[in-house]
Amino acid sequence: MELKLVRKNLMSQHETLRGLMTDLEGALVTGADTTALIKGLHDALVSHNAAEEAVLVPILTHIDAWGPTRVELMLTEHRSEHALLVEKLSPTAPAETLRELITHMRGHMAYEEEHLLSAKLLQDDVVIVDAD
Ligand SMILES: [Fe+2]
Ligand SMILES: [Fe+2]
């Protein structure tokens, strides 16, 4: 898969996640039942994280200035952050925790879009070989 297409897919998933987060925020304000919204966001996040982690090695390796040590550190940190976000996103979590989580997720995605998924970075025709 070309990096441009990888970028397009991941960015599209980010937009879906943003929409789900906005819906959840709205429900938290009105006091509506958030169970289904949290489950939907949770499932979308798990799916997105798996897709992202699967292509992160070739993306990070593509960033020429990054040495192998930095790539490894970035991968480890990124996976840990994914696991933390998924773990905290629970229907039993208090509203304040969910709001903080949404802020954290938005920051996580903004960082990715600036540093890992920028159009400038992922613009050539480098081909990523699917792992499966
Ligand atoms: Fe991520
Ligand atoms: Fe992401």
Image: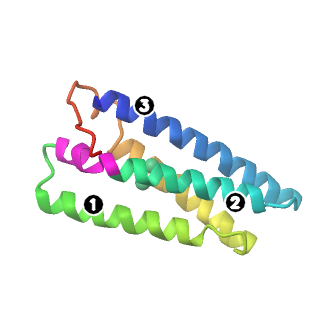
Q: Report which residue position mark 3 lands on.
A: 8
Which dot, 3 or 1, sits closer to the camera? 3
Relative side of 23 to 32, left or right? left
Q: Which residues are magenta?
A: 54-62
Give residue 74's mark: 1
Viewer-proximal residue among 51 and 12: 51
Nearest the eye: 117 or 89: 89
Q: Determine whether 3 is above or below 14 in the image.
A: above
Q: Quadrant of the C terminus?
A: top left
Q: Quadrant of residue 49?
A: bottom left
Which labelled disc corresponds to residue 38? 2
Locate residue 80, reporting x and y percent: 39, 69
Q: CA distance from mark 3 to mark 1?
A: 21 Å
Residue extending farthest front? 132
Q: Which of pointers 3 and 1 lies earlier in the amino acid sequence? A: 3
3D distance between C-alphas at marks 1 and 2: 28 Å
Could you tell me what secondary structure mostly forms the magenta stretch? helix
Disc nearer the start of the sequence (3/2): 3
Identify which residue is drawn at 57% across, 39% down. Answer: 15
Q: Establish if 109 lies above or below 2.
A: below
Q: Quadrant of residue 62?
A: top left
Q: Amino acid at mark 2?
A: Ile
In the image, residue 113 lies in the stretch drawn in magenta: no
Query: Residue 99 appears at what percent x and percent y?
Result: 67, 64
The amino acid type of the residue labelled 3 equals Lys
